[in-house]
């Protein structure tokens, strides 16, 4: 006798999100798009063109560009099919570094800058230099999730490659001020430093050539404090004499006479003075732009942990919210060199949209989002009213107003509850009387006021009230 196949029933599991990731509902997306649109408009004003690169890159592109700590935070993707096929027991016993090349060839991008450098290297023959591009895409980091730190988050990057001009640095400062002030974030600081100054500090304190280790440690100053930085440097072989010589640089404060104070402090390092001179030029260019109330500060402890920066570096802190930096970037002279292309200098800035969102949410800076959703809803009482409303719907949409009709024939209360829940400001009631008179009832959901108007009059009313 034929036996029916056994059916396996999968147990139901409660749906969950991966740690460090978030869903964004319609209301949140309206707010996020407000940020994206503000940033995108500013980038275009400054002459940047949009670019996109794949979420997945070869690990050969990503590895070695972010320092050892960054490499560990890369999400690696197991090879398709039987990823163990080319391995043996010795590979697995050899640890992560030995096994990784055999089981994973690709990874999720860690930032947008390295993929951009890869794009430039691959397309340099067709690009017009200087090349100004912006990208608005998600990136992934296998970090420990906490407030303001996610494993998946968006970056909004703007970079210029193919020029050494410090005009680019000055324009980054201008864009930072324009975007943040337009978003309503008024109390912020743009911190600036220069990698040559950090190299000079390493020389001055007797740790020449060890600026990489120094930068990684002092980049954590806000998180672990001076004692924590000192402990980390001691563990890395720095002496007590090195730390005592470092102390004045950790306590340096930006002021009106900052360059007068800075130059004597760095006088014994020609490299550091080159960095100071470039910062001076950036300051002069910003003054030339006429930026009012510039929120600029030189911070000698600003290091930007990424190993590819070589010139000016930037970081932005929102002062009214306890959070890490909301923007960051800098100049990199050698990034495309790792892809076999020399002599292309670049500078860029990245806006951390997720952190900016959290800042604006905490400070209640988002404007009323009603106008971004449905502007007006048409009711649906029966088939006749439904058919009458279709051309009305087309006219409203043709006039540029986000419009929808309730899809099912239902009682008025249910339809108005729906409109209220979606925060739709206006509802058009279409009943037998409205169809006979060819005048619709426009209901203001906020005030409750109702008026009888033709479709043309409704559009005219919307035009005047916007």
Image (cartoon, helix red, strand yellow):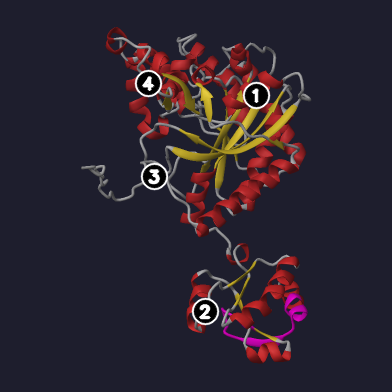
The residue that appears at 67% across and 46% down in the rendered structure is: 178
Q: Given this view, does label 4 or label 3 mark the residue nearer the observer?
A: 4
Visible residue check, residue 315 = no
Visible residue check, residue 59 = yes
Q: Is label 1 in a helix, a strand or a loop? A: helix
> How many angstroms separate mark 3 from mark 1 (CA)?
33 Å
Q: Is label 3 in a helix, a strand or a loop? A: loop
Within 10 Å of the Cα at label 3, are there few (<14), some (14-19), or many (20+) other Cα atoms? few
Position in image of residue 261 (x %, y %)? 58, 27
> How many angstroms separate mark 3 from mark 2 (CA)?
38 Å
- Look at the picture and state if 242 lies above or below 247: above
Position in image of residue 63 (x %, y %)? 48, 18
The residue that appears at 67% across and 12% down in the rendered structure is: 342
**Start-end of magenta stretch:** 442-459
Residue named by callout 4: 82
> How many angstroms separate mark 2 from mark 4 (CA)?
56 Å
Whether residue 140 appears in magenta in the rendering, the answer is no
> How many angstroms separate mark 4 from mark 1 (CA)?
31 Å
Where on the picture, by quarter, is residue 73? Answer: top left
Residue named by callout 1: 119
Where on the picture, by quarter, is residue 344? Answer: top right
Q: Given this view, does label 4 or label 1 mark the residue nearer the observer?
A: 4
- Look at the picture and state if 200 lies above or below 432: above
Residue named by callout 3: 147
The residue that appears at 46% across and 12% down in the rendered structure is: 210
Of mark 4 and mark 1, the one earlier in the sequence is 4
Q: Is label 2 in a helix, a strand or a loop? A: helix
Position in image of residue 39 (x %, y %)? 64, 45
- Look at the picture and state if 110 lies above or below 237: below
> How many angstroms separate mark 2 from mark 1 (CA)?
51 Å
Whether residue 443 appears in magenta in the rendering, the answer is yes
Q: Quick one: quadrant of the N terminus?
A: top left
């Amino acid at each position: 006798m034929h036996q029916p196949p056994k059916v396996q029933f999968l147990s139901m599991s409660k749906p969950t999100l991966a740690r460090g990731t978030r869903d964004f509902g319609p209301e949140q997306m309206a707010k996020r798009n407000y940020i994206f649109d503000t940033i995108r408009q500013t980038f275009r004003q400054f002459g940047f063109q949009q670019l996109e690169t794949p979420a997945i890159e070869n690990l050969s592109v990503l590895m070695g560009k972010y320092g050892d700590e960054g490499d560990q935070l890369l999400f690696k993707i197991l090879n398709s099919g039987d990823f163990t096929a080319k391995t043996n027991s010795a590979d697995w016993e050899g640890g992560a570094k030995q096994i990784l090349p055999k089981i994973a060839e690709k990874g999720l991008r860690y930032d947008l800058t390295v993929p951009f450098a890869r794009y430039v290297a691959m397309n340099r023959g067709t690009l017009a230099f200087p090349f100004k591009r912006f990208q608005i895409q998600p990136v992934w980091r296998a970090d420990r999730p906490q407030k303001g730190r996610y494993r998946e988050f968006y970056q909004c990057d703007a970079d210029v490659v193919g020029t050494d001009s410090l005009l680019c640095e000055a324009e980054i400062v201008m864009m930072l001020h324009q975007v943040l002030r337009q978003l309503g974030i008024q109390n912020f600081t743009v911190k600036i430093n220069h990698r040559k100054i950090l190299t000079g500090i390493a020389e001055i304190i007797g740790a020449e050539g060890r600026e990489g280790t120094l930068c990684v440690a002092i980049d954590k100053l806000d998180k672990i404090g001076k004692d924590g930085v000192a402990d980390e440097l001691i563990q890395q072989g720095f002496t007590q004499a090195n730390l005592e010589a470092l102390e004045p640089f950790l306590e340096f404060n930006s002021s009106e006479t900052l360059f007068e104070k800075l130059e004597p402090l760095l006088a014994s390092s020609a490299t550091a003075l080159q960095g100071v001179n470039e910062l001076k030029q950036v300051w002069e260019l910003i003054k030339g732009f006429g930026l009012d109330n510039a929120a600029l500060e030189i911070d000698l402890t600003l290091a930007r942990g990424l190993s590819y920066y070589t010139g000016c570096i930037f970081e932005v802190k929102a002062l009214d919210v306890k959070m890490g930096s909301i923007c960051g970037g800098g100049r990199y002279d050698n990034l495309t060199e790792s892809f076999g292309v020399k002599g292309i200098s670049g500078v860029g800035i990245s806006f951390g949209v997720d952190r900016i969102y959290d800042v604006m949410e905490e400070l209640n800076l988002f404007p009323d989002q009603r106008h971004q959703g449905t502007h007006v809803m048409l009711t649906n009482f029966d088939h006749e009213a439904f058919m009458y409303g279709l051309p009305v719907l087309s006219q409203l949409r043709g006039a540029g107003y986000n419009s929808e009709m309730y899809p099912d024939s239902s009682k008025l209360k249910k339809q108005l509850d729906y409109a209220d829940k979606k925060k739709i400001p206006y509802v058009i009631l279409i009943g037998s009387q409205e169809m006979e008179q060819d005048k619709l009832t426009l209901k203001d959901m906020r005030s409750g006021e109702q008026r009888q108007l033709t479709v043309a009059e409704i559009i005219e009313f919307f035009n005047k009230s916007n």
